Image: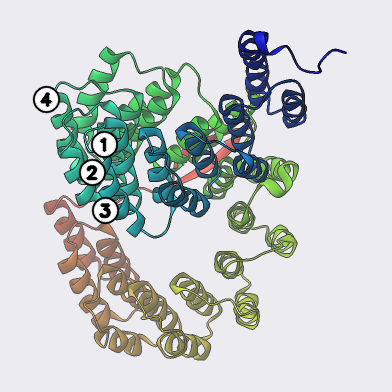
């Protein structure tokens, strides 16, 4: 009768070949995330072969990387023999799927219940778990172990340790560990670069120069990080230098580098250079288009932003929630209702993939386009509403002649238990000003500090001055300014001056104008308001003298402009 297993004399040759065959199959299952087939291989392996640590480890790695951590842990606990690969695989699997607490528990178990010492890969996985953990004390415990194991000069361990320290905000400690490493590599420098970008981006330029001076070559991650930092500190001069080095390095085709390069130019208001860099990108994705459109919007060109997003759609790229929010903000700035409705259709197609920020931008777009009925529909369809949602509706009503409805919205918001913020009160006070609701305005203004612990800022005082001034309470408005707990800025004095122009209040108007011009002598608004007040009172001599003063001080009136859309092309025209 034949044995069900191969003869003992041939086991040494058959098992390795069979084992490697099934290991290769497991790798293919892992690449395709085919859990069902992987489990079938698992079952077959233990029917035809003697179990081994080698096969167990590959099965363990398969389950862990597929995210079946319960299967992996069960298999791990059933193993009669475990080596450092076994421990590293199970710990790495839990880290990979965000289970830092369980990973650290397993690492602790390895040290206390096992005779197996961790190697550099185990320690790196444990450090990654520490970086995900909320408690930084694990990091300091790991440092003692690293020294005991003699890994303090191991660049892979040092890089993981530096990264973990940075994620816990320990930038100084990370820099100390970095500087103590005798064999740094580019990854080490990149880890510190990301730390400076997150916690102290003003130090990025000097760190970049240090890296170059020590002979290290930046890679695509280095360039992307540096350009992002330079965009934050508006350092165009260094940005041009780094761009020159990028051209020589050959990393310019990387999409992340291209995105950050465009962002650096646009944040520095070099629109033509940013546009050129964007169009030279070999493979722009939805993030590239969205970021570039947002930058056009930042630079005051919403028409170009919409043009770029339309180009993206024609290329077949599917917008994400950030794309839609940018598109709605651009439509609101123009305003371009037809484009807004088109992007609204895309928002409906995305369904639950969008979040509350997109719907807030959508209802704001309709409100700024004067379509309050559509804003109401969007608002009522939102499953969740934030303070931004309510504030956008309050402002929309106030701007579209529905001041009373704006205040009703505020009352409903309070009934819903949503706490207003300082911007909400600006909108509420603006609504009171638009509706001439003086008593309500006084009530809401006094309730800010008393009921909501919000100290009124200059914008709130400007709204109150506007409310009182428009109603003809000029002297009360001036007294309110003089009682402000901080030094009044240009805005409140210009607001008072505008009220004086409206009601022909010469003396208070001249005082307000003097205060505004003393604070900012080159702002044309103060001169124009005062000149209009003089003209309204037929005081042409004062108008002439004021215009002469503007010429002597080189103060120029900024011309107005308006957007016009002809055959789906938006253009700006001087007023």
Asked if 497 appears above or below 186 in the picture, the reply is below
Pair 1/3: label in front: 1
Q: Inspect this view and state whether residue 312 appears.
A: yes
Q: Residue 334 lies in what quarter of the image?
A: top right
Q: Contact (CB < 8 A) between labels 1 and 2?
A: yes
Residue at 11% over, 25% down: 213
Residue that label 4 marks = 213
Which sits in the foreground, 325 or 178? 178
Judge left or right: residue 445 versus residue 36: left
Pair 2/3: label in front: 2
Residue at 43% over, 89% down: 446
Estimate the spatial distance between the alpha carbons at disc 4 and disc 2, rounded to whole Å: 30 Å
Q: Earlier in the sequence, mark 2 or mark 3?
A: 2
Estimate the spatial distance between the alpha carbons at disc 4 and disc 1, rounded to whole Å: 27 Å
Residue that label 2 marks = 147
Where residue 69 appears, x then y in whole percent? 63, 43
The chosen color scheme is rainbow
């Amino acid at each position: 009768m034949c044995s069900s297993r191969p003869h003992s004399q041939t086991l040494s040759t058959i098992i390795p070949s069979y084992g490697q065959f099934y290991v290769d199959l497991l790798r293919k299952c892992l690449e395709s995330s085919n859990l069902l087939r992987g489990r079938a291989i698992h079952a077959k392996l233990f029917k035809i072969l003697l179990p081994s640590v080698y096969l167990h480890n590959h099965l363990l790695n398969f389950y862990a990387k597929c995210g079946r951590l319960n299967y992996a842990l069960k298999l791990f606990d059933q193993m009669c023999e475990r080596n450092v690969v076994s421990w590293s695989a199970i710990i790495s699997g839990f880290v990979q799927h965000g289970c830092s607490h369980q990973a650290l528990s397993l690492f602790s178990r390895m040290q206390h219940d096992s005779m197996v010492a961790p190697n550099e890969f185990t320690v790196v996985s444990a450090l990654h778990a520490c970086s995900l953990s909320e408690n930084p004390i694990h990091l300091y415990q790991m440092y003692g172990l690293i020294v005991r194991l003699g890994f303090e000069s191991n660049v892979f361990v040092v890089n993981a340790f530096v990264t973990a320290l940075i994620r816990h905000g320990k930038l100084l400690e990370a820099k100390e560990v970095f500087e103590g490493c005798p064999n740094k590599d580019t990854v080490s420098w990149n880890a510190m670069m990301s730390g400076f970008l997150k916690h102290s981006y003003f130090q990025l330029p000097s760190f970049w120069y240090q890296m170059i001076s020590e002979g290290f070559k930046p890679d695509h991650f280095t360039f992307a990080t540096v350009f992002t930092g330079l965009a934050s500190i508006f350092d165009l001069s260094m940005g041009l230098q780094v761009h020159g080095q990028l051209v020589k390095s050959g990393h310019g085709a990387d999409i992340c580098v291209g995105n950050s390069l465009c962002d650096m130019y646009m944040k520095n208001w070099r629109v033509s250079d940013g546009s050129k860099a964007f169009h030279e990108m070999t493979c722009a994705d939805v993030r590239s288009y969205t970021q570039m459109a947002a930058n056009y919007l930042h630079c005051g060109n919403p028409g170009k932003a919409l043009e770029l997003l339309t180009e993206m759609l024609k290329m077949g790229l599917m917008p994400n929630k950030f794309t839609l929010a940018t598109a709605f903000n651009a439509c609101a700035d123009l305003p371009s209702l037809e484009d807004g409705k088109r992007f609204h259709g895309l928002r409906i197609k995305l369904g639950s993939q969008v979040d509350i920020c997109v719907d807030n931008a959508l209802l704001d777009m309709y409100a700024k386009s004067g379509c309050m009925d559509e804003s109401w529909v969007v608002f009522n369809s939102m499953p969740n509403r934030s303070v931004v949602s309510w504030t956008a509706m309050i402002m929309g009503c106030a701007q579209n002649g529905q001041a009373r409805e704006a205040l009703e919205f505020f009352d409903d918001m309070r009934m819903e238990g949503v706490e207003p913020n300082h911007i909400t009160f600006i909108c509420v006070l603006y609504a009171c000003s638009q509706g001439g609701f003086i008593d309500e305005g006084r009530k809401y203004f006094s309730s800010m500090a008393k009921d909501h612990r919000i100290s009124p800022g200059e914008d709130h005082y400007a709204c109150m001055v506007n409310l009182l001034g428009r109603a003809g309470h000029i002297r009360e408005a001036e007294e309110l300014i003089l009682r402000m707990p901080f030094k009044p800025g240009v805005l409140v004095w210009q607001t008072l001056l505008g009220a004086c122009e409206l009601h022909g209040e010469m003396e208070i108007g001249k005082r307000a104008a003097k205060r505004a011009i003393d604070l900012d002598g080159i702002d044309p608004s103060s001169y124009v308001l005062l000149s209009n007040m003089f003209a309204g009172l037929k005081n042409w001599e004062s108008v002439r003298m004021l215009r002469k003063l503007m010429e002597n001080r080189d103060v120029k009136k900024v011309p107005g402009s308006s957007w016009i859309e002809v055959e789906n092309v938006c253009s700006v025209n001087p007023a």
